[in-house]
Image: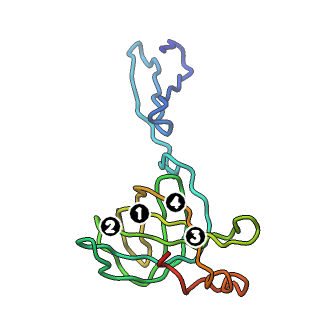
Amino acid sequence: MFQFQNNPVEESSPAEPRRKLVRHRQDAVLQEDLVLEIGDDRRSRRRYDLGFELQYKLIEHYRVARAGNGKTVDLSSNGILFSTDDSLKPGSFVELSIHWPVLLNQSCPLKLVVNGRVIRSESGLTAIRMDRYEFRTLGTGALLAAGNRTFATDIST
């Protein structure tokens, strides 16, 4: 849409909601300026700041190459950012087991199991892009641990 006045017209497409195309007339010449909102988050999905304990497994050649603990920093429908003492190589395949705070039927503890690839890892933070996820119930041994609020025992179920 063009508007031949001194008022700029802002347009944005659904695919790029953060980019604004500003068209205006100046000295009888139509100019197009691409304006990016500086400081705005360019992620396509909303992130939720949730700090849940997790355990990860680094998978190489269908085997667990390394395992460790961490804590989520934020989650979205596409990815997870978590903190850990280890640095994971971008492109590596990981499985996260996140201890979920909600009980199934008010009695059975859950965990969120996420498979994905590391997209970046720096300064104690690792970001993964999720390939798939599922909720699983924890075993009976973890049920006792859930009452004590310690979840560090079970990542195998």
What secondary structure is marked by label 4? strand
Q: Disc 1 marks which amino acid? A: Asn
Q: How far apart are labels 2 and 1 at the CA level? A: 7 Å
- In contact (CB < 8 Å): disc 2 and disc 4: no
Which residue does the image show at 39% across and 82% down from the upper left?
A: 67
What secondary structure is marked by label 1? strand
Q: Is residue 156 above or below residue 106?
A: below
Which residue does the image show at 62% across and 82% down from the upper left?
A: 142
Q: How far apart are labels 3 and 4 at the CA level? A: 8 Å
- In contact (CB < 8 Å): disc 3 and disc 2: no
> Residue 39 placed where, x, y %?
51, 52
The image quarter containing residue 74 is bottom right
Q: Disc 3 marks which amino acid? A: Lys
Which residue does the image show at 55% across and 69% down from the upper left?
A: 73
Which residue does the image show at 45% across and 80% down from the upper left?
A: 84
Q: Residues within 10 Å of mark 3 (few under 14, many from 20)?
A: many
* Residue 111, label in figure: 3
Earlier residue among tags 2 and 4: 2
> Residue 72 placed where, x, y %?
54, 71
Which residue matches tag 4? 134
Q: Disc 4 marks which amino acid? A: Glu
Which residue matches tag 2? 93
Earlier residue among tags 3 and 4: 3
Earlier residue among tags 2 and 1: 2
